[in-house]
Image: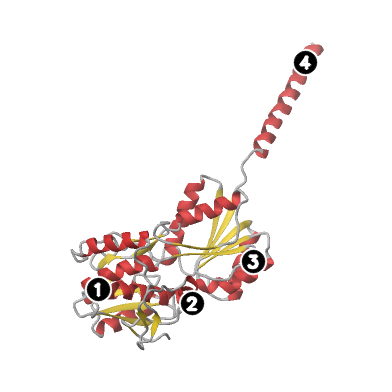
Amino acid sequence: MKKRLGVLMLALVLLVVSVAGCSSGATSGKAEVTKVGFIYVGPADDGGWSQAHDNGRAKMVENMDGKVETIVKENVPEEKSAVISTIRDMVDQGCTIIFGTSYGFMDGMVEAAEEFPDVKFEHCSGYMTSDNMGTYFGKIEEPRYLSGIVAGLTTKTNKIAYVAAMPIPEVIRGINAFALGVKSVNPAATVNVSWTNTWYDPTVEKAAAEALIQQGCDVTAQHQDSTATMEAAKEAGKLSIGYDLSAAQSMPEVYMTAPLWDFSGYYTDSVSSVIDGTWKSQQYWGGMTDGIVLLDELTTLAPGTAQGQIDTAEAAIKSGELVIFAGELKDQSGTVKVPVGTTLTDEAQLSMDWFVDNVVGSLK
């Protein structure tokens, strides 16, 4: 009896050891989850810029199939102290790569990158880099140009409103590309700019659009993060070009098309490179051929002749036959900025501080 009991006890001990070993092996074999931080200047559901990034983030998470966890901080002010504080919190939570998605985050991210050399940082639309901080953006001027074609064919008053956020090269470049698209089909039309000096303030954006409409503009366009410009157009019975995200469902009464962003591919590739150890600081600037920027499908409110002209221009841009900032280009004073036979360099585009000659408005 004692012998049988001893055998049973030995078997039980071996079983416990075996189960413990299996449990330990399962834990040690579990794939490590990479934590990724995203910093937004507005709410993640703003209907524009921040939501475009958040859609890209969500698709990246789906693509990574359980390998990543994301931490999102919304409504972060474009102040160095706020950015650094946000980043410190993300690092404390284990983030090994952090994306800052607004131009004004740049100085704070540069300082934080120096403080945390083992963390990777990527800044959207900026120009400052370091060994552990890169930049990324898209050639949104390509679909901006195409959307200008739609606006130029639509306007009856030859006055197009453009509600713009900040007078920085990114926004100025987009306005100029849009204006050149307008000019390609309607040389008599002007693009009338109003600055809001905010990325996201629906009240200010709407007031700016209303003022331009009162001045005779019958089509609106925008470089803003909300749909407020389109709201103003809707109330005034005008038509609109959106930005960032499609408004075909939310603004069907006024929306014709928009230059759109798709960050999902870039975010997937970048995070994958962190996981496999191949990430390197770079200055990425992709175009429509990369899929990071595109023009939304035209709605039935767009002129019937627009689609054919869009298709032709898009094909020419993608092939390199059509270069948006190719000479001759003059500024508002009539000074030739890009002579015939030349094109604006990438460096000159990234520091653009002048308007083409069919833009009405100041640079302040």
Q: Nearer the viewer, mark 1 or mark 4?
A: 1
**Residue at mark 3:** 113
Image-based side of 187 in relation to 12, left or right: left
Q: Nearer the viewer, mark 3 or mark 1?
A: 1
The disc at residue 7 is 4
Could you tell which of marks 3 and 2 lies nearer the N-terminus?
Answer: 3
Give the amino acid at mark 3: Ala
Give the amino acid at mark 1: Gly
**Residue at mark 2:** 351
Image-based side of 352 in relation to 16, left or right: left
Asked if residue 229 shows in the view, the reply is no
Give the amino acid at mark 2: Ser
Q: Residue furthest right?
A: 2
Label 4 packing within 10 angstroms: few (<14), some (14-19), many (20+): few
Secondary element under disc 4, as helix, strand or loop, is helix
> Which one is in front, 50 or 17?
50
Image quadrant where residue 208 sits: bottom left
Q: Position of residue 26 (x, y in %)?
A: 65, 35
Secondary element under disc 3, as helix, strand or loop, is helix
How far apart in space, not on screen, are marks 3 and 1 (Cα)? 44 Å
How far apart in space, not on screen, are marks 3 and 2 (Cα)? 24 Å
Q: Position of residue 126 (x, y in %)?
A: 53, 70
Asked if residue 313 shows in the view, the reply is yes
Secondary element under disc 2, as helix, strand or loop, is loop
Tell me: residue 24, above or below residue 316: above
Could you tell which of marks 3 and 1 lies nearer the N-terminus?
Answer: 3
Could you tell which of marks 1 and 4 lies nearer the N-terminus?
Answer: 4
How far apart in space, not on screen, are marks 4 and 3 (Cα)? 62 Å
What residue do we see at 62% from left, 46% from top? 32
Secondary element under disc 1, as helix, strand or loop, is helix
